[in-house]
Image (cartoon, rainbow, N blue to C red):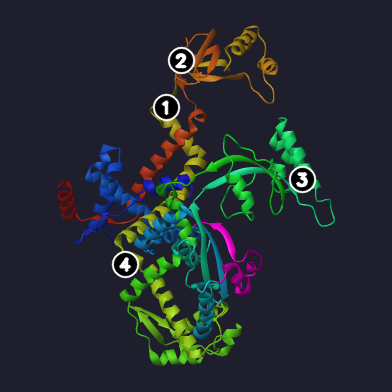
Amino acid sequence: MSIKKIIAVVSVFIAMVAQAQQKNKEILFTINDKPYYTDEFIRVYNKNIDLVKDESQKDLNNYLNLFIGYKLKVNKAYKLGLQESESYKSELKNYRNQLAKSYTTDKKVTEELIQEGYSRLQKEINASHILITCEENATAEDTLAAYHKAMAVKKRLDSGEDFATVAKEVSQDPSAKENGGNLGYFSAFRMVYPFETAAYKTPLGKVSNPVRTRFGYHIVKVNDVRPNRGEIQVAHIMIMKAKEGEDQEKPKKLIDEVYAKLQNGEKFEDLAKQYSEDKSSGPKGGVLNRFASGQLSSEIFENKAFGLTKDSPVSEPFQSEFGWHIVKLIEKYPLKTLEESRAELDNKIGKDDRSIRISNSLTDKLVKKYPIKVQKQEFKKVSDAITSAFFDKKWELPTNKSPYEATLFAIENKNIKGIDFLEFVKKQQYQNYAKQDLAKLSNQLLDKFKKEQINLYYNDNLENEFPEFAHTMQEYREGLLLFDLMEKELWQKAKTDTLGLKKFYADMPEKPMWKPRAKAILVASTSEKTAKEAFKMLKQNKTIQQIKDKFNTKENAAVQITEGVYENTDVALPKGLPFTAGFHDLVKQGDFYTGTQILTILPASVKTLDECKSKVINDYQQYLEQHWVDELKKEFVVKVNPNVFDTVKAALKK
């Protein structure tokens, strides 16, 4: 949303947090017989009273007039159909989705995960694993078979067999054949959550029990634990290793030559551009993106980089799996504090497997809140419509959908039909379910469908569940409408109605004024000597361009010269400057020495419309709005209940 729109929305009572709803609300006023209640008026008044600077607006009678004017504008917006705009609907939907996030997560579980993630980030784990693959949606039988296979591997390890040897033999992670299952160092959020948890909970040197992830079962061995090194940014010069049949010593000789050039004072960046064979970083002076442990594919490179210090910022040539390198330290970034990391951690959790814990926690609560009774006959009917074509992703909805229009179950007053479930089934067939008994599959899908529908119902019902959510949405909804209305009815008119604007300016009893002004030339430089020489040239009637040509280059503007008209209070003028025509000697202000030539003095005068157009437009908008509200009061019938308003005033004064 634009800044302008934010300001507009705020200015028309968009609130931060709603206060408790008044239990015994009464009708305060009506607009065309539509009632507006005391609870909303009291809530909005209490929320906005501290923001109001105009004391007259704190008066309850005046505030009621403002509030009625606001509601009149909203009614006008609805009358014009502005709520049907696609841009309005889209922006309102996006805002609701953002606002709903704080109501559709378990805050307690989220905080636990933030604390856990930050705690784990303090350490880096070096771990190895053995993987026994098992599809995420595998049958119970296939899952159990994979588990038994993993347990058999665990027994071999417990009996003393070497982990790397067993990994090369049985692990279904293709990389294990080369690395013996070793994954190097990593920290939190680098691995899938269940695997990460196993790594952080397994003691140093020990082997975990099989742990299930979406890839299958893992057996994890913790090889080392060390403090997190944070992140680092470096630049490097790389000479790639020689290919088979090439001179194997040539890369080493070349990197040594480059290192010698560095020792002789040549710039690292220039040498990287000239010699580095890393095509992505070489043209940028060898600079790499910042990284943490485990993010590069070379542990040797990472260790050399993290070993650099400010006192020793450039490495000697060293060899990695990819070739020869010289690395230069740019900056090290230690771990942030918990509070500094909180927003980033929350974002990572939302994108990570651990977010399932949050959604599951909320779903468990909602399942208890909204008990569901499935109609057995209807469920049998829809279950019979599911065929084995589902497993081949070829199942289609029944051609005749009418037999499945009956209610499958209800969530409070919302009926969910059998056809709704079948449409869910059609989408689910692309989730790679393993072949299994169709009855078991139907029950599994029904369980997922019920949870999905409960969450959707809860989200759709937030306005009824949480009064403060409903209040905020109402205020945002009306605020957006009012912005569009003001843009259409006032702001654009004030900008484009040139005749009306000229008449408004002509009728202004007090027009904007210029203070006494001076047409002047200012010569400034951070060097007193340069400023004196440049100012001397000005006194000798040299042109501004001649002075600039003498002192300024493309790389360095040693002198700044400006010519303009300045009011006597303008901060651009040196303090204490005599407001008289002529040359005025250098004055030091901050880092600059400034000399001034006042060419002409202009007395105080009325500003022309062009000279104060933005202010006149703003005043014209306010004028139009005041008269517009009067017109709206004629267009709509407003009836205030004075007795109820007296009760409100008495309550608020207490």
Nearest to N terminus: mark 1 or mark 2: 1
Q: Is residue 256 visible?
A: yes
Residue type indicated by callout 2 = Lys
Residues at marks 4 and 1 touching, judged by CB atoms closer than 8 Å: no
Q: Is residue 554 magenta?
A: no
Front position among marks 3 and 4? 3
Q: Which residue is mark 2?
A: 575
Residue that appears at 37% across and 86% down:
374
Crowd rating for badge 3 (residues with CA inside 10 Å; few <14, some 14–19, many 20+): some
Residues at marks 4 and 2 touching, judged by CB atoms closer than 8 Å: no
Front position among marks 1 and 2? 2
Nearest to N terminus: mark 2 or mark 3: 3
Boundaries of the magenta span: 161-187
Rendered position, 116 above or below 233: below
Residue type indicated by callout 1 = Lys
Horizontal side of 20 relative to 414 (left or right) equals left
Nearest to N terminus: mark 4 or mark 2: 4
Nearest to N terminus: mark 3 or mark 4: 3
Question: Closer to the camera, 266 or 540?
Answer: 266
